[in-house]
Structures are given as structure tokens and as C-alpha cells.
Image (tube, grey):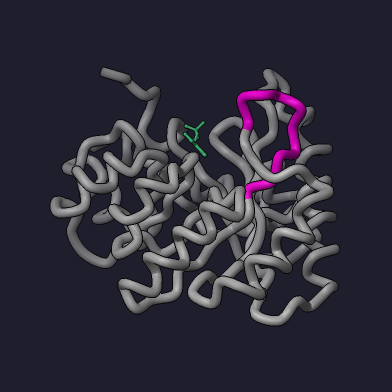
Amino acid sequence: MMDLKENLSSVLSRIKEAQNKSRFNQKVELIAVTKTVESDIINQALSLGVRNIGENKVQEVQRKYPDIKGDVIWHLIGTLQTNKVKYIADKVDMIHSLDRIELAKEINRHAIKNNRIIKCLIQVKISEEDTKHGVEIDNVIPIVREISEIYPNIKICGLMGMAPYFEDKENARSYFIKLRSLFDEVKDLNIPGVEMKHISMGMSGDYEVAIEEGATMVRVGTAIFGERVYL
Ligand SMILES: *Cc1c(COP(=O)(O)O)cnc(C)c1O
């Protein structure tokens, strides 16, 4: 509990500092990444003022959902299989990892079933690493147009991206600049039904740089909850 409180306040003050440095004047939301973190710890984080939590696995959302108390906003941030959309369509507020049309089709179908609109970010492949998923930069505008035209229960709200891991976080900056400029390009198109509002970029190792380059959402796990233990 001690550590959690200290870690959280340190992350929040670093976010503020980076915001002050940023020339974009943007609001920044902290998404506390709770993968592998048990529900009682998540509830402690919520009692300390965390509001947004991010999970990368559908099974973890399902397992923890009944135990998480209060005013909480769920984000799905990890790669999503089409056959699992049905388990989270009634639970998550935003999906950060929309990266293909067939997934959009399934999200839309289940959003309709649940009589809701699901907010989505297009995950963009800004790094050359094969392990990082996402839409290729050149395909982002066509996919945003297509999804917004044919899937009314999906609300595209922005872009998500991941820089490669670097010892020196300065090296991540060029990747964030790339995502920011793509975001501006899509935004300037004023595509009907699309509300370009969020850039989800930055993790424990590089969120300050991401904020300096325009992030409106940072996804931070380790810096809040400590190193993950995979069982
Ligand atoms: C795990 C994860 C994070 C958080 O990573 P940390 O380095 O622990 O802050 C952010 N985004 C995604 C998609 C993740 O899977």
C-alpha cells in the first residue's frame, strides 16, 4: 500500500511536469495498466484516485470485473481476437487496439447487441519490430474511412501506438512525433463520425517523452504497480 501510494503520486507529478513542458496544452489521462495485478490491489489504486484501468487480456477483464468496485473506466489495450469480443463488449469503455476490419466488424456487431457505442483507437504500427501489432501507417486513413462509414456503433476517437523499448527514452521521441503527425493528418480530414481526440502513447519507460509530443493518454503499469509477476 505504501509503495502504491508513492508510486502513483510520483507518476502523477511526472505527468504534470511533462504536461507543463508540452507545447500542445493537452489534457492527459492516466490509464493504470493492471495486467497481472490482482483485484484487491486494483481496488486500492481506485481508492487512491485512479479512474481508468487498462487490461491487455480478455480473460483478465472477465475474471476481475465482478470484484472491481466503484467508478471505474475499463480500457482494453492488448491484441484482441475476434472470437473474444463478445466477452468484453458490455464491459469496456474503450478499445485501444483496433487494427483490422474484421475486428471492427465484430466489435460493431456486439456493440449493437449491447445497445451501445464502443469507443476505439486505431492501433498504428509505428515501429519496425515484428512483435508490435498495428495498422501500417499508409493504411490508417483508408481504414478510418471504411470503419466510420460502415460500422455506426464504433466511435473512432484517435490513435494508439507503441515505441520500441530503449534504455534511453529520448530514442522513443521520433516514434511519438510520427504518431502525432499522423493523428493531425487524420484529424484535418474531418471524416464524418470520427472524433480525433486521443493519442494513446507512452508506457512506464517513456510516458514523459510521449506527453511532451502530444499524448492525451498514457498507459502505465510497472511504474505504478511494480514489476509484473507472471504465474
Ligand atoms: C503492459 C502494457 C503497457 C504498460 O507497460 P509498462 O511498461 O508496465 O508501463 C502499456 N501498453 C500495453 C499495450 C501493454 O500491454
The residue located at (30%, 61%) in the rendering is 91
The residue sitting at 58% across, 45% down in the picture is 14
Image location (x, y in percent) of residue 95 = 48, 56
- As for residue 111 lying within the magenta part, the answer is no
Whether residue 183 is visible, yes or no, is yes
* Residue 200 in view: no
Instruction: Give the quadrant of residue 146.
Output: bottom right
**Image: 91 above or below 96:** below
The reply, left or right, for residue 84 in relation to residue 23 is left
Q: Nearer the viewer, residue 176 or 112?
A: 112
**Rendering quarter of residue 5:** top left
Q: Number of marks in the image?
A: 0
Task: Depth check: give the residue in front, 193 or 105.
Answer: 105
Residue 11, image x, y percentages = 50, 43
Residue at 78 percent across and 51 percent down: it is: 139
Measuring from the top left, give residue 19's x and y in whole percent: 67, 56
Q: Going by the image, does 147 lie left or right of 73? A: right
| Foreground residue among 145 and 8 | 145
User: Which residue appears at 65% of the width and 41% of the height?
Assistant: 134
Residue 52 location (% of width, % of height):
40, 57
Q: Which residues lie in the magenta part?
A: 123-132
Q: Quadrant of residue 71?
A: bottom left
